[in-house]
Image (spheres, grey):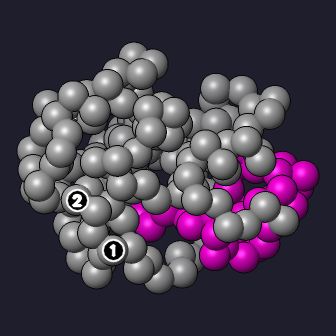
Amino acid sequence: MRTVKILGSIGTAIAALSLVACGQKSEVPPTPAATTTQETPQEVQPVVAAQFATAPLIDPNTATEAELSAIEGLSPAAIQAVLNGRPFVSPTALHAAIGAGLSEEQQYAIYSAMFVKVNINTAAAADLQLVPSTLAPGKLAREIEEYRPYKSVDDFSREMQKYVSAGVVINAAARGSSRPRR
């Protein structure tokens, strides 16, 4: 089960970042409510991970109360903070509204399901630090900053393949590039 969460959240993070990889315009359709995760037999984890990696992220600026309620670890108070704090212009703005008192595990679960889109070529380090990652703290943010600017989603995907499997990056990039532009 941990494999599903790790691969899924990395794919989700890359998808979130791919969506804005080169300053492309963001027009993301509303996302369906998140589904709950169940224990998965070892032999089907890769299939589930691939599907989870391409699941749409919930946009906190457009999510319904029901969609927010489906996010594991998001308390009723945090849901109200999201609903009342809109619009969020950055991940740090969202984190300021809901991050107080969150454990690292809760933060990881919440930001794997819901994230504010950023332009990876211009995003502040603090915003990149909030991207869920199984890498050492800060490593993903440092790597993203080191190779800026990215000329295309493919350029970004190629660079991120050094840190996660190609399948996850390809799924995330395909999801990101299929939208008119995060």
Using the rendered image of the protein, determine whether residue 136 is visible from the camera's viewpoint. yes
In depth, the one of 83 and 171 nearer the eye is: 83
Residue identified by numbered label 1: 25
The magenta stretch spans residue 75: yes
Q: Is residue 39 left or right of residue 165?
A: right
Q: Is the Cβ of the residue at disc 1 closer than 8 Å to that at disc 2? A: no
Name the residue rendered at 66%, 48% in the picture.
93
Q: Is 80 placed above or below 12 here? A: below
Which residue type carries mark 2?
Cys
Image point (16%, 49%), residue name? 150
Q: CA distance from mark 1 to mark 2?
A: 9 Å
User: Which of the 4 image quarters holds residue 59?
Assistant: bottom right
Q: Position of residue 23 (x, y in %)?
A: 28, 62
Position above or below: 161 against 167:
above
Q: Nearer the viewer, residue 134 or 180?
A: 180
Residue furthest right in the image: 77
Residue 149 falls in image quadrant: top left
Work out whether residue 168 or residue 39 is closer to the camera in this orientation and state it.
168
Range covered by the magenta-colored residues? 55-83
Could you tell whether 171 is left or right of 60 in the image? left
Give above or below for 82 relative to 156. below
Residue at 77% in and 47% down: 97
Q: Secondary structure at mark 1?
A: loop
Is 109 on the left-hand or right-hand side of 75? left
- The residue tagged 2 is 22
- Whether residue 49 can be seen here: no
Q: Quadrant of the C terminus?
A: bottom left
Kind of residue sitting beneath label 1:
Lys
Would you call the spot at circle 1 few (<14 residues within 10 Å), some (14-19), or many (20 or more)?
A: some
Residue 36, disc: none
